[in-house]
Amino acid sequence: MNNSELEKVLKEKGMDACIINTGEKELFSFRKENREQQPEAVNSVTKSILSLVTAKALEENYFELGTEITEVLKVDASFDGKTVEDLLTMSTGLTEKNWQEAITAEGWLESLCRSKIRSSDKTFHYNNADSYLLSAVLAERIQSNWLEYAVEKIFSPLKIEQWEWKLSPDGLPIGGYGLKMTAEDLMKIGILVLNKGQWEGEELLTSSSIKKMTAPVVDHAVRNQHYGQHWWITPDKPQIVYGAGKRGKFLFLIPEKNVAAVFLGELPGEDLLPFQWFVKYASSSLQNT
């Protein structure tokens, strides 16, 4: 991997941070001056971390993948048959239009719950509405601020302390975005997934949960990329599993090669540059290792 070339492009584009690991061994590290250890907005990478919390709640039987949304939330009758799994795979029929309408309403959750969808529609629609309803399901079933649950089950064992998760006017964490954390802590999330739920000898999540959430469910969802349970997966081998956020926020994993990478910055209109950099400077050079 050409570290000097990568560092040059990161500086040119004003990136805040980049870390590349094989397992827990750091191969490359870049931080913008005066941004060291600063929590950064990870935008829609938030969705992938929401998936981890949901997986833990599933393991502890707060609900099942097949639990119908109508069993938990007071939604319109058109949601009949829609499940937690549909929320995770963004297949409820809700769209980003529903989300934009909700966030201009007085009650975000109430607005989404009133949405009328086609009961037979299982089409993938990338959106923030499904993530928000998933946040509401967690809150309803855990019967507490589910952020406390996330801290107890995941953040605290990983020693993630510098974080912030934005709340909606309903008082719910915005499931699809709104999380801030440091690049170092986001890397811990990546290592946890690479280690199939193990952290320092403790099982935070089962390997089957990790496998299920990062397995393709929706083929060729967007830009030929597959979608799992709030995680993206490339169609090529070795597969790259990743969380992706607007303006160039990424958590990349190559489980087959035990590689993890974090890119954080602000790249309006150039959201996919870190994906290109990862493939060019890291992924390709590690293919034969």
Image (cartoon, grey):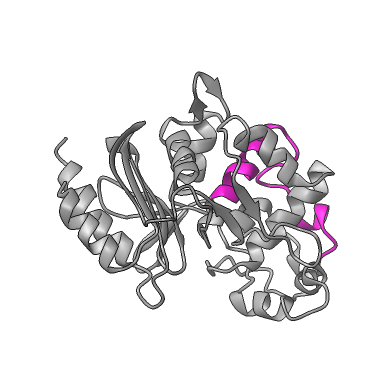
Please tell me which residue is depicted at 30% across the width and 66% down the height of the picture: 273
Choose between 199 and 227: the one closer to the eye.
199
Choose between 2 and 283: the one closer to the eye.
2
Choose between 6 and 144: the one closer to the eye.
6
Q: Residue furthest top?
A: 201
Please tell me which residue is depicted at 72% across the width and 46% down the height of the picture: 147
Q: Which of the 4 image quadrants contains residue 155?
A: top right
Q: Which of the 4 image quadrants contains residue 14?
A: bottom left
Q: How many marks?
A: 0
Picture layout, residue 101 above or below residue 237:
below
Residue 215 located within the stretch drawn in magenta: no
Q: Position of residue 169 (x, y in %)?
A: 79, 67
Q: Which of the 4 image quadrants contains residue 132?
A: bottom right
Picture layout, residue 250 above or below residue 145:
below
Classify the position of the C terminus by image quarter: top left
Left or right, 150 with reference to 249:
right
Q: Position of residue 227 (x, y in %)?
A: 45, 57
Left or right, 224 with reference to 39:
left
> Which residue range is magenta in the image?
49-75
Q: Position of residue 20 (x, y in %)?
A: 31, 44
Picture layout, residue 172 above or below residue 108:
above
Left or right, 278 with reference to 261:
left
Q: Position of residue 89 (x, y in %)?
A: 55, 57
Q: Residue furthest front?
A: 34
Picture layout, residue 228 above or below residue 255:
below
Choose between 66 and 254: the one closer to the eye.
254
